[in-house]
Amino acid sequence: MSDAKPALLCLNTGSSSVKFSFYAVQNDQPQLVFGGQIEGLLGRPNFKAGDPQGVVLAQRQWDVPMRRSDAVEIILAFIRQQALGYHLQAVGHRVVLGGVEYPQAVVVDDHVLQVLDRYSPIVPSHQPAEVEAMRLLRTQYPSLLQVACFDSAFHRTKPELADLYALPLSYRDMGIRRWGFHGLSYDYISGQLPALDPRLAKGHTVVMHLGSGASLCGLINGKSAYTSMGFSPLDGLMMGTRTGSLDPMIPLYLIGQQQMSVEAVEKLIIKESGLLGVSGFSNDMRDLASSDEPSAKLAIDLFVYMLARETGAAMGAIQGLDGIVFTAGIGEHSPMVRERTCAALAWAGVEMDLASNKAHSDSPRCISTPHSRVSVWVIPTNEEMVIARDTWMLARTI
Ligand code: ADP
């Protein structure tokens, strides 16, 4: 009998990258052993892997584009060579949309893949790639257990009103709902709150996930009750290249009156707008923050304005505000955006401790003053850990 240690692989497959994390399972808890990614699949692919201490384990670059299937094979080959002494029990995948069918993680089979395929047109930038990766592994390694973990699942606890558009009800039944996304991140943050701040864990808390995609989630008692993203990951906050909330007449007008094609409008609102569109030169908050261009300042002003406005919407929806949590790239690393957002929400009882906000740390920390009515936290997110946890919960029973 083999005494190899159980292990899990988490895959996050995007349109131009495949990210991976390899976990050992000890005492029923996944522990990160190493991780990495292949980025730039459509141009000059770049493979990099490292351990949790930041030691680089492998690095390689190619000059020609790479198929996603080849990227997955390269990652599996690296794991076979790197993870001696481990037995891969399952692969957990990040999947953006699981619809009403999957309010929690599910073991992948042909039927699951068929259902997920149907949701692909709603998230063309991610879902088709994720489904392709699962299908590929199912063909190549039929006995390998695969689990799909959904960004939409955490929001299935939302009340009906937070799920509904004011369309005839037959459209809801067709799947036109406020699904919500970034749920793996919100699930992780919600799981951290009881130990960090029990008042926020039980109260009305707005979590702001501010990465290249951005959304916020209104939690009541740790469960999603409202989220700024809707039918697709386009709605709500301004993002790196996405518009956030947009009057639906605008695409209709551009297509109907300005002779833009559907494809051109799709590209405009998904890839050419947001911080990039308004600044005219970058989707990266670091570039904008260090620029003297008036358009960069305008892009940051609009980002903060839309964030404060959406927080007001969340407060109305969840009927209160006990705390705010900042997370993801911008949320964790931009004291400037945090300071400006809290200043815009001072009317709601938010009082930031400026020194704590500026202090550098990678650990969860409270950055509000002791007498602020609303507590403010920075909590680094860990979506992969949620994928590993949920994958193990299903794998250990099989
Ligand atoms: P994703 O996983 O959605 O690609 P991340 O959560 O890694 O995104 O966030 C990426 C974004 O975070 C970048 O586009 C950048 O704007 C922002 N970011 C990262 N580091 C910093 C920083 N030090 N200051 C300001 N913004 C940052």
Image: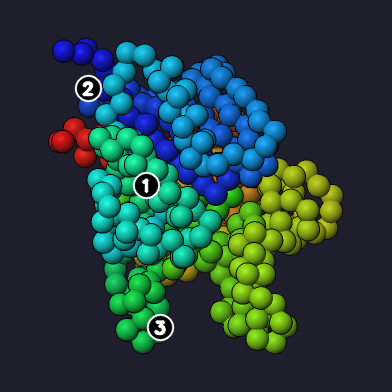
Tell me which amino acid carries mark 2: Asn
Residue 335 is situated, as x and y percent measured from the top left of the image, at: 63, 42
Q: CA distance from mark 3 to mark 2?
A: 48 Å
Mark 1 lies on residue:
135
- Horizontally, residue 343 falls left or right of residue 88, namely right
Residue 272 is situated, as x and y percent measured from the top left of the image, at: 69, 61
Residue 356 is situated, as x and y percent measured from the top left of the image, at: 57, 36
Tell me which amino acid carries mark 3: Ala
Q: Who comes first in sequence, dot 1 or dot 2? A: 2
- Horizontally, residue 356 falls left or right of residue 268, namely left
Residue 62 visible: yes
Q: CA distance from mark 1 to mark 2?
A: 31 Å
Disc on res. 162: none
Mark 2 lies on residue:
27
Compare residues 53 and 109 and report the one nearer the observer. Answer: 109
Compare residues 26 and 117 and report the one nearer the observer. Answer: 117
Disc on res. 166: 3
